Image (cartoon, grey):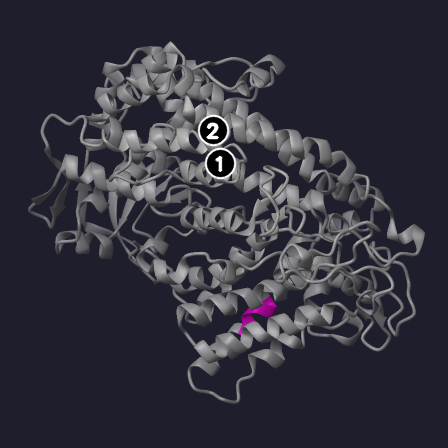
Amino acid sequence: MSFKATAIKHIDLSDQRLHSNLALDLLTKVAGQLTTEQFSAALSTVYGSDIPAHTYHALQQRLLAHQIESPKIILTEALGYEADYDNREQIVRIDRGFFRRIEQGLDTSWLLDALLHEFGHHIDNILRHDLSDRDAEGNPVLASDAKGEEGQRFSRWMALRGEPDANEVTIVTCFSGYQDMSQEITVQWKTAAEQIQARYNDAHGNNDVIHTDPDREAFEAGHEDDHQMTHRRIEAVLSTHGFDRDEIEAVYFGNWLRDYSQLLDPKIVRATNMPKDFPDVLSRDALTRIVDVLAVKRFRWRRNFAQHFTVTPAMLGVYRPSEHIDNPKVTDANAFDPTTRDPDFEPLVQEPNPLLGIDYDTSMKRYIERSVAFMQAELTIAMKEKRTFAGMRAFGSALHVLEDFFAHSNFVELSLIKNGHSEVVPWTSPAPCKAGLPLVTGMFGATDVLASVAGPLGAILFSTEDVTYKPIKAGDRSPREQVLLILLEEHHNPSYLHTFNTFLTTRDEWLDLPFVEFLQRSALYLQGLSAVVGNAVGIVMKDMLTHLGENVDDWQTRYGQDPHLNGSTDPTHSQLAKDHAEHPLHVLAGSLAISAVSDVAKAMVDYWNGDTSADPISIATAYFKHPQDSHWQDDQVIAWAAANPAELRRSQSKTELAEISKTLAHSGSNALEQMRKDSVAYLMFLRGEFLDKDSPLWFLHSLTPFGYLSRKVLEYLKLI
């Protein structure tokens, strides 16, 4: 749920003041109930294990000595968010429109959630700046911000662990005018705490919405690096054409689906007539349902429009090179035809297929025409469906192709070369075409697929945020549990799925128990041969890590050939991709994409508003040209080169670019290694152990069949 405050310039109000000590009182009470070790262990699940135990101890001591103060709270007009926290000023701002809705009867648990959320940021700020160890120059040694959304984690943790003295509590006191007239806003703690937990369980982990101020952290939003040009950041330009926040998210949903369709690669999709062979192959249905779990986690407001945003096989599709402008060339002479796995895959493309050739007049690879045709088809749907969920989803799908044109081709490199920077590395050899150097895109290989799979799966399977998940009602399952159920359905041994389901249905019977007793029951059940949570993760990871590890080295040998030396016009995706901020041309590529998206968005809105002369299809199609035949970008490219001489020099260094592409080519093994480390860390957290994450002994032990919850975790679970 969100309440939009759309003005850009916020105004702090002086005639109304808010005060709240509730979050501080709750945390202080918890600090007095736990030992030093228990307090440190509990807080590390909120703020991270990078903060040392003695820093958490220092916070505990200051809380008990009443040396921590609540942040000042200011009502603000047109904040743009329900609430946010200013790390520099240590101030919480509450949007006046949001507060007015609370006063008029909106569920007060939202205000409680917002204040707990922002107080969570306040404590992170204190830990990482005021209490942090210092280096020789007096600077804090800790990262300036916790990973993920610590405010959200703190709010949920307080909802689970907080124990106010009475069930009816005062959230905030509002002082108005010059006579200090006050108004108290109260809430029934138990009901509000359950609602906060329900919102967290429903869609925790979303931190992809942009906050424009790097010192500010918003309720129901996170922030990205200003130099990271993601699809979501590029599409923020839609706001200048009248799209509100929810509409931008609806458009981005269509874009996001194209990215995640890459999970359904033909190498890992099991045909309907194939036997189960986990983890070598998974069914299309299983992979689609996993993406749906990821969608629920990412698009938190989606639950209000489930009929429009449930990911189905038809909506998601499968990996098709044309939808990403990827070079479809397959170099393996023994490769199978993907359509034998599923007819929705594009047929195998090998030499001498005409698609791999270069059109002399356009100086572009011919397969790019397929991508343009897909984009045009999606734009046609968007024009027909107009400003509906279906229309905006199709619009986002089309924009994905347009944006990828700048990130996945050498358009930017060729534009720089055209404008006098001839030393820029083009990632292609000359070819018979009008421009001499052709416009090409990269080949997307299996190691890229591995990187795509390992990241999102690891984020769900090994998050410690919901290790003590308590359903709100029977049948509720955490994202991890949903993914494990899907994966265990794919396992050839049905007993694993049966055991896991037995635990979950048994756990549903304990929902009315107090939280501590619920955890005690869960922990007692999860001992010995019934340690199914750890077993499920261990079973899945043992098979997946073994399989992926055996194949990643073989996959990577197909990378690394230099197209400048061998006469090739077929670079790899990792050589050309400018998706990552490390690439010197990343920001320029993103900036050009923003210009193109803005142009097409204006035409689409004009068409939706009744201007039949507006032609978003023609405008979008016009961007798919070789830079020699395109001039709109020249001024922007020239200005960027003049303002960024260091990045320009980097784009001319084959050695540096080769290192960047090598890093990306090894993204599969890097993702696999991170997945392994995360699995070890998660299983050790589940056990309550605090040993070396990189210990081979612990890794091997974590994959044994049974015995994941020790007596120590029982003690821990009783207190968290």
Main SS, magenta region, reads helix
Position of 636 with respect to 40 (left or right) is right
Helix, strand or loop at label 1? It is: helix
Helix, strand or loop at label 2? It is: helix
Residue type (three-letter) at the residue carrying disc 2: Ala
Residue type (three-letter) at the residue carrying disc 1: Leu
Which residue range is magenta in the image? Answer: 595-600
In the figure, 425 relative to 549: above or below? Answer: below
Q: Hey, which quadrant is residue 671 in on the image?
A: top right
Residues marked 2 and 1 touching at CB (< 8 Å): yes
Q: Residues within 10 Å of mark 1 (few under 14, many from 20)?
A: many
- Residue at label 2? 536
x 47%, y 49%: residue: 289
Residue 300 visible within the image: yes
Check residue 488 in the rendering and tell me which mark sits there, or answer none.
1
Q: Earlier in the sequence, mark 2 or mark 1?
A: 1
x 48%, y 19%: residue: 684
- Return the x and y of residue 417 as percentages of the image width and height: 82, 62
x 41%, y 71%: residue: 242
